[in-house]
Amino acid sequence: MLYVIHAYDFTDEQALERRMAVRPNHFDGAKQLKSTGNFVLGGALLDPDGKMIGSMMVVDFEDETGLNHWLQNDPYVTGKVWEKIDVKPFRKADI
């Protein structure tokens, strides 16, 4: 099942520093997800000035158990980058 994730970063002064510190590990995890067919697309959410303020991902997991296991172990979660995470089932338009 596809899921769309909108994750918003903490807004404290160290938030961007934490993001950048764990970003390589987050990318390594995304590459692993891609190799197993779980990563569909993703990228940074930006404010009007182009500053990263969060992330959007579309992922494919068999069930919410797999999704939650991955999400709880993502470096942006364990590294306290993402403050608010919204996950919804997603249906790709067949066009």
Image (cartoon, rainbow, N blue to C red):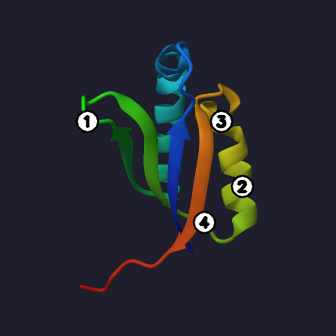
Lower sequence index among marks 4 and 1: 1
Residue identified by numbered label 4: 61
Residue identified by numbered label 3: 77
Secondary structure found at label 2:
helix
Residue 15 marker: none
Lower sequence index among marks 1 and 2: 1
Q: Nearer the viewer, mark 1 or mark 2?
A: 1
The quadrant where residue 73 appears? top right
In three-dimensional space, the C-alpha distance between marks 3 and 2, rounded to whole angstroms, equals 11 Å
Compared with residue 74, is residue 65 higher up or lower down, i.e. above or below? Answer: below
Residue 27 placement (x, y as % from top left): 46, 34
For the point 24% across and 29% down, the residue is 49
Give whichever of 18, 70 is nearer the camera.
18
Residue 45 placement (x, y as % from top left): 37, 42
Residue neighbourhood size for the residue with mark 3, other residues' Cα within 10 Å, grouped as few (<14), some (14–19), many (≥20) = some
Lower sequence index among marks 3 and 4: 4
For the point 52% across and 41% down, the residue is 8
Q: Amino acid at mark 1?
A: Pro
Residue 31 placement (x, y as % from top left): 46, 42
In three-dimensional space, the C-alpha distance between marks 4 and 1, rounded to whole angstroms, equals 32 Å
Asked whether residue 32 is in view, the answer is no
Lower sequence index among marks 4 and 2: 4
Residue identified by numbered label 2: 68
